Amino acid sequence: MAQLKRFTIDPITRIEGHLRIEVDLDSNNVVKDAYSSSGMFRGIELIMQDRDFHDVGLFAQRICGVCTYTHYRVGTEAVEAALGVQIPTNARIVRNLLHASLFLHDHVVHFYQLHGMDWFDVVAALSADPEKAAAVALKYSPTPYNAGAGTFRAVQERVSALVASGELGPFANGYWGNPSYKLTPEQDLIMLSHYLDALAVQRTLAQAMAVFGGKNPHPQSLVVGGVTSIMDIVDPSRVAEFLGKMQSGAQFIQNAYLPDIRMIADAYIQEAKSGEGYGVPDFMSYGAFPIDNIPWPKGAMLFPSGVFNRNTGMVTDLNADQIKEDVTRAWYQGPNEGVYPGEESTIPDYTGYEADGALNRSGKYSWIKAPRYQGLPMETGPLARLLIGRARKDPLIEKAMTDFERSVPRGFSPDEWYSTVGRTAARAVEADIIASQVGAWVDELAANVGQGQTQTYTAPSNTSGEGFRLLDAPRGALGHWIRIENGRVTHYQAVVPSTWNASPRDHKGQMGPYEASLINTRLAVANQPLEVLRTVHSFDPCIGCAVHIVDSKGAEVARFQVD
Ligand code: NFE
Ligand code: MG
């Protein structure tokens, strides 16, 4: 067998945190082996020790600067689960509205700012015909977003000036001209123009969060037992302000994001049909957006929970007992088969790199643990949520997926979801589903308030207990486990979406989802790993979340024990 070539991308950019991907290429530049590693260590779970339970959400929220609110919510709800607190309906709705603003913000920023340039060629966009581009935009939406020839010409002038100055700014270091870019120059120009529009849209969505959350990022209106947004929910002008900002985000999703994904699905037909970027066959969701007050997992959710296997087509109910974190190949101590997060410790065991700087492929090689469900790696995130919703015959999700499949001019078969194109499309479809619910949730809130139900908070009556909260974040399945004794935290463990997806191998040698998804990917140009980046980015990696414990020098880290 011919010698494989090692190719290292470190760091992966346009993500949160520090991620390294090492792949082996054969002589045709096809990926034959892949390793995903984080070189970053943090300590939020450890910081939680001995804190007053009221502070858990605020500390947990600092796990990440991107999905801030989600750790705030799940940390707070873990406390509520441990103490047996039932929050009032208004609090559940406000928490969902805040979550909706986070999901829409994250998905828009991800597709354009973090992932867009894996799909579109900025330099080629400059040679497009603006009149033709305006006509092309009409092929993907009857009402395309800010897509007139004049707008496109202005975008070209703006970006050309940047290129002429030699200061490419956000467009520096791209693989411009790579043959793996499949859009026409006119399609590139539409994407470039919406990339710039998205910068304003994300600001509006961040402002939406601040209406009920007080500020963004890191909102501050959740407390154990409910929310403190009482002044905002009884003031129709505040509710209208939130709704207006969310509706303007929804319009962008309808008229830019979804149409642009249709365009990509159209152009990247070969990548979608061949399943490029498909990784593991198992998909998991804890569910998201509870729409009744019945405790998890029995209550109804906008996105139902479950575990789905592509090969059998079967969806099964989740059993939290089946979650374990395997650290055989991660820089921690622990037994081979892993430990349930409710019992798990975080004991660093840093063993370093090979002498030539490569990952230690026979030993430990990442700060990211390897969560497994029933011993299996799971892909989690928007694609998992859609596949599980479809398998559970959820009418809203089924309709949204079918509508998308039909809306791609060349058609889009159900098998094509199992690809990088599909994973990216799923995020847009999900954003549209969420946006479509916001009006009804706001109406429900207004109806409650109109009937005099203004309660937003239930005081906790216990100070000790044990529990967990499983709820999906934008990137997938998020769990926080907690034990509280006499008002103080004695155990904390978070198992986060990017930990599932970016996980290293486990004691059985099973690859994590990023790793598995890269196998057989072919690079069009040997030293330009565009296709690898595209697939890794399609998961929307967040390494701050994934490790939640930073050794900035890569040197020996102090040892500490939780429990
Ligand atoms: Ni830091 Fe997060 C989300 C969580 S991680 S972005 O979504 O939890 O994967
Ligand atoms: Mg953890």
Image: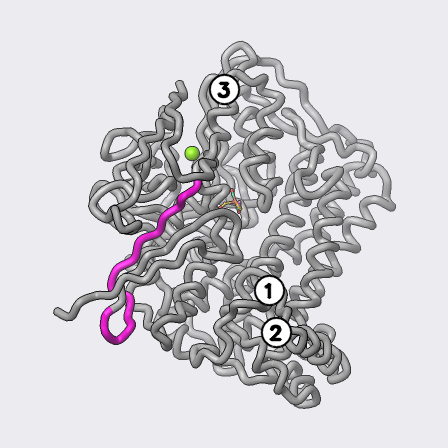
Residue 49 badge: 3
Q: Mark 3 or 2 closer to N-term?
A: 3
Q: Is residue 5 left or right of residue 287?
A: left
Q: Residue at x 41, y 73 (%)?
A: 272
Magenta-drawn stretch contains 36: yes
Q: Specify the segment rendered in magenta.
A: 26-40
Q: Residue at x 39, y 68 (%)?
A: 529
Three-letter code for the amino acid on which mark 2 is drawn: Met
Q: Secondary structure at mark 3?
A: loop
Q: Mark 1 or 2 closer to N-term?
A: 1
Classify residue 313 by image quadrant: bottom left
Distance between mark 1 and mark 2 Cα atoms: 8 Å
The answer, for residue 563, to whether it is visible in the render is yes
Three-letter code for the amino acid on which mark 3 is drawn: Gln
* Front residue of 130 and 300: 130
Contact flag, marks 1 and 2 (Cβ < 8 Å): yes
Residue 112 badge: 1
* 450 over 342 or under it: above or below: below
Contact flag, marks 3 and 2 (Cβ < 8 Å): no
Mark 1 neighbour class, 10 Å CA radius: few under 14, some 14 to 19, many 20 or more = many
Where does the image place residue 337, in percent across and percent down from the top left? 24, 35
Distance between mark 3 and mark 2 Cα atoms: 46 Å
Which residue position holds label 2? 191
Where does the image place residue 71, in percent across and percent down from the top left? 56, 37
Classify residue 446 by image quadrant: top right
Where does the image place residue 498, in percent across and percent down from the top left? 44, 47
